[in-house]
Image (cartoon, coloured by chain):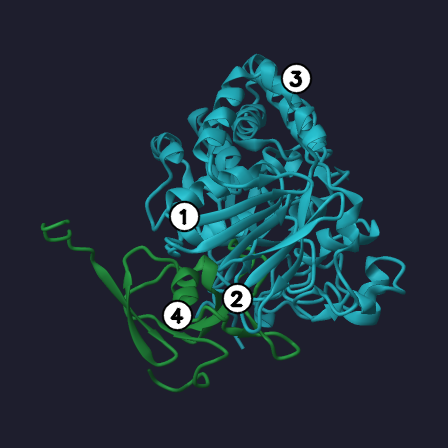
Amino acid sequence: MRHHKPPHVPATRVWLDGEALQVPEGSGLAAILLRHRPAGWSRSVDGGLRAPLCGMGICFECRVTVDGKPRLACMTPCRDGMTVQTDLGSSVGDTP
Amino acid sequence: MSAPSQPAPERWSVVVVGAGPAGLAATCEASEAGHSTLLLDANVAPGGQIWRPHRGQPAAHARPWLARLQASGAELRCGARVVDVPSPNELRVQQSSGLQSNGVQSVHFENLILATGASERFLPFPGWTLPGVFGAGGLQALVKGGLPVEGKRVLVAGSGPLLVAVADALRQRGADVVGLAEQASTGQLLGLAHALLRQPRKLVQLMDLRRRLLGVPWRNSTWPVRAHGIDRLEAVKLRSSGGRSHTLAVDMLACGFGLVPETRLAQLLGCRVSSGKVAVDESQRTSRPNVFCAGESTGIGGVDLALTEGRIAGLAAVGHVDAVVRLQTARSSHRAFADALDHAFRLRPELCDLPDGATVVCRCEDVTWAALQHAEDARDAKLHSRCGMGSCQGRVCGPAVETLRGWPLPVPRPPLFPIPARFWRPSTETSASPCPSREPQTSN
C-alpha cells in the first residue's frame, strides 16, 4: 500500500466537443479521443462511426477539427487550450 | 493584384525525407561530411515508427542518434510532408501536421535521400471497421501516444515479427494479451532457424522475447475471420488451418499482415520500383543518379538494416566511397536475414477468402468486396466504384486489393497527400490546360 504522495504530473486542458478535459502532458490527441469516444468519432460515407486504424497518419479515420482546422488526431499532440470538434459534436463555429 | 513576395528558394546539398532510423543515420553522415543537410519528417517529432516517442519522450534507441543529429549541424524540420515534385530537383513541402496546410514551400536539392519507411498491410474481414480494431503497429503507436491498455483484453493477430514486438510492448503496459495469432505455419517459421543461427544476436533477442511472452497463447496457422460487436469490438473469431475455429472476447484487436514499403515519392521522382520496393544498388542509389533510398522503402528489413543503409546512403551522397565499401558486409548480412524473414512470413491463400460481399474494402469510400468483383484492375475499380479515391489515396485499400486480387499498386499522382486547393500548383508538364500560377497565401 502506497502512502507517499504521487509525483505531480502537469496536466493540459483540452476542449472536446465543448467539454473540458484534463489530459496528461505529452498525450497524443488520438489516444485521448479513444479514451473518451471508444466507439469512434468520425463518420464514414455510409454514416457509421470510425475509430483509428493505422495510428500513423495514413488511414484518415481519426480525422477531427482542431482550433478550426482539419487535422489527423494521431499526428496531433495535445496542447493546452486546444479545441477539438468531432463529427459527433456541435457543428464547427460553436464556442466551447 | 500584387502577389505576396516569395522568400528566396531554399537550396540544400542533401535533403533527407523521413526521420526514422535510416533517415537519421543518413542525415548524420551527410551533415558530418560538411554538406548542408535538411531532414524532413511529417510527424511532430523524429523517430519514425519504430522509434516513435512515448508521450513526447524520445525512444531510448533514438537518443544517441538524436544527439548526433543535433551535433551534426543538420536542420530538422518536423510537420513537413512532401506533396509534389514539380521539377527534377525540387520538392513541394507542406508545412504542418494533418490535413490543413500552413503553406507549401519549394525545397531544392542537389542530392536526395528517401527514407520513407513502410506502412502496415491491412486485409479486410467481416467487422474489421469496428472501433477497437487497430493495426498491430497501429495500436502500438497509439499506446505510445498515451492510450492506456492496462487491464484491457487484447488479441494480437495477422503476420510478421512485428506481432511479437507489439504483444511484448502491450504486456509491459499491463494489457491482458489473450493471444497471438500468426497466419504463417510452424513449418514456415522453422525455416528461420538456419538464418537465426547465423545471427546469434537476433537469436538471443528472439529467445528473450519468447520468454517474456510465456503465458500468452501463441498459435501459428491461425488468422481472424470475423470481428464481432455492435458499435465497437467485443469479440474476434479465429480460424486455424485444419478448420477449427474459436472466438475470444476482447476489448481490442491489434491486427496487421506484414509491412508494405512506402514508394510513392520515389515513383513520383521517376525512380524504378520493382516488386513494390524502391530499386537501389549497393550504394543505395536509385535509378536516378542523385536520388538515394534507404530503409524499409527499399524492402522490409528491420532497424539494423535501415541504419546500415541510411549510413551508406548518406556517405554515398557526399562521395565517401571507401566508407560505403566498408559497410557492405554488414549490409549483406542484414539483408540476408531480412530475406529469410520475408520468406518465412509469406501470406497464405486462405486470407484472400476472408471478406464476404458486404465487407468494406475501401474504408474511405465504403466500397464493398461485392462492388469490386467485376473490376479488372485498380484503375477499373476506381472508375466504377471510387475505390482508392478517398483521403488515404489507396494507402489502406491498395495493399489489400493487391493481396486479394493481385492488382499492382496504382502509380501515384500528385499531390501525395490531400492539401487545400489554394495551395495546388499543377506543374507545367502535368497540367492539362495552362492556368495562371497562383501564389500560395502566407496566412493560414
Amino acid identity at mark 1: Ala
Q: Disc 4 on helix, strand or loop?
A: helix
Q: Is residue B223 above or below residue B185?
A: below
Q: Chain of mark 2?
A: A
Disc 2 to disc 4, how far (Cα)? 12 Å
Disc 4 to disc 3, how far (Cα)? 48 Å
In depth, the one of B216 and B441 nearer the eye is B216
Q: Chain of mark 4?
A: A
Q: Residues within 10 Å of mark 1 (few under 14, many from 20)?
A: many
Closest to the camera, between mark 1 and mark 2, is 2
Q: Which residue is mark 4?
A: A36
Amino acid identity at mark 3: His
Q: Which chain is cyan?
A: B
Q: Disc 2 on helix, strand or loop?
A: loop
Disc 3 to disc 1, how far (Cα)? 38 Å
Q: Residues within 10 Å of mark 3 (few under 14, many from 20)?
A: few
Whether residues under marks 3 and 1 lie with C-beta atoms below 8 angstroms apart, the answer is no
Residue in the image at 63% along x and 35% along y: B300
Disc 1 to disc 2, how far (Cα)? 23 Å
Q: Which chain is green?
A: A
Amino acid identity at mark 2: Ala
Residue in the image at 65% along x and 24% along y: B192
Q: Which residue is mark 3?
A: B194
Give the farthest residue toward the left: A4
What label does residue A51 carry, if any? 2
Asked if badges 3 and 1 are on one and the same chain, I answer yes
Asked if badges 4 and 1 are on one and the same chain, I answer no
Q: Which residue is mark 1?
A: B45
